[in-house]
Image: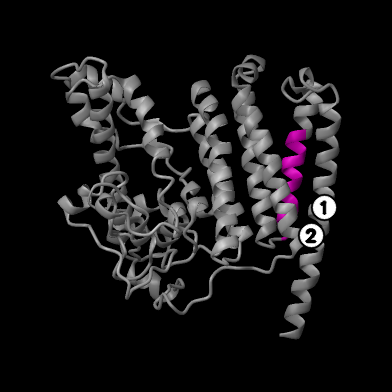
Amino acid sequence: MEVYGKILLIAMPAFLLLVLFEKWYGWKFRHDRPQNMDTISSLSSGVTNVTKDVLELSINIIAYGWLVSQIALVHIEASWLVYVIAFLCIDFAGYWIHRWSHSVNVFWNLHIIHHSSERYDLACALRQSISMFVNPFTFLLIPAALLGVPEKVIATVGPLHLFAQFWYHTVYINRMGFLEKIIVTPSHHRVHHALNKEYIDKNLSQIFIFWDKIFGTFQEEMKEVPPVYGITRPVRTWNPIKINFQHLWLMMKDAWRTNNWKDRAFLWFRQTGYRPADVAEKYPVYKIDDPFHFEKYAPKSSAALQSWSWFQLVMILCFISYLFGQISYINGLDPYFIYWYGAFIFLSIYAITELMDRNPYAMYWEGLRVLLGSWFLYSQGDWFGASFYLSSVKYIIAAYFVVSLFITGIFVMKHRKEDQLARANA
């Protein structure tokens, strides 16, 4: 927990700078118009994912360490070779987890967030799942366990393997020559993120592209078929927490509504997107049929709202960075405080993205967030020891909460009036 938090203190600023550099490059040299709300939504999703990971809010059905102790045939000595083997084993497991996430209905809920952006950029790489509370996939590391790869090596290589998937989420790098035959490149992964029927469920590899070629899921990017990004059932929200559970909620409603008991029991394990016929007819869900003619999600947003959303994201990044840097201290205050702090981060993300969606309930979520933050200040007379670094910090944070609640209220009232006027003129 603490070590991963320290790693993220370095990784998060690096990823943010690269995202902003890509935005600047696109604006300066490719004349691309920055999509601020999509970027903020992606970055917010990254915050929820790393918070969940640092708090270790998931359970492995099979612990890898136990697996090694039970089935290891040999024990490779710690050397560069063991790290290479670990990387290959993790990449092999990653391919199959990825493939099943695209082909099994209930597993798609673990992956939908990553495909939810209708743009393809470095920011969308940060859209990672928070919905996997139980991990059933450890058995895919059996090859590593048979070779006796130590648990600490897997724990070290795992984050590096994940970080190595960041760079190829861009439209600004074209074909890469001979590397196209070895590793996953931006061209390969553009195919993967496209909703065109020619590209769906292709190029599922994470680092080495040869898994797709071995298992029959490879597809070249075609000039005559430009990739269109997103998913065929668009999520229509900037809220990453909603996106993470949207597909699961649809399956739960379908299981409740269907009259077919077989579907009620097995729709979870059918092909991704499957819905019982009786429910699909009575409760249709919008689906994109023509990738070149559909309206992308872009609710009205003023320059003021975009600026405020960026400011709130920066504040959330400050709060999360402090959490990662002070995990030991916060745990020492009270073991439960770290989870309450995590709840504060999740409420912060929920509140600002609901405001970006122009949802009037954003005011209630902001109120809950401010209430929880104020309780921290009141109960400690401090913000988790931050007064050691700045004596006036509690007053600054208290003032921020008051201003944040006030400005959120102004935006909610403004949006309500605008929406009422738009309905009256419709």
The amino acid on which the numbered mark 2 sits, given as a three-letter code, is Phe
Which numbered disc covers residue 411?
Answer: 2
Left or right of residue 256, residue 309 in this image: right
- List the single residue furthest toward the left: 73
Q: Residues within 10 Å of mark 2 (few under 14, many from 20)?
A: many
**Residue 379 appears in the rendering:** yes
* Residue 360 or residue 69, whichever sits in front: 69
What colour scheme governs how the chains and residues are painted in the rendered image of this protein? one colour
Residue 327: horizontal and vertical position, in percent? 60, 22
Name the residue beneath numbered marker 1: 407
Image vertical order of residue 283 relative to residue 14, above or below: below
| 398 up-or-down from 205: above or below | above
| Viewer can see residue 239 | no
x, y percent for residue 21 = 57, 50
What x and y, as percent, mark residue 305? 74, 59
Q: Which residue is drawn at 64% across and 24% down?
A: 337
Residue range corresponding to the magenta coloring: 360-373
- Label 2: which secondary element: helix
Q: Is residue 370 magenta?
A: yes
Number of other residues with Cα within 10 Å of mark 1, as a class: few under 14, some 14 to 19, many 20 or more: some
The overriding secondary structure of the stretch rendered in magenta is helix
Q: Which of 326 and 375 is in front in this view?
A: 326
Residue at the (79%, 28%) spot, across then down: 377
Q: In the figure, is residue 97 to the left or right of 370?
A: left
Residue at the image position 48 percent from the left and 33 percent from the top: 53
From the viewer's perspective, is 105 left or right of 387? Answer: left
- Label 1 to label 2, Cα distance in Å? 6 Å
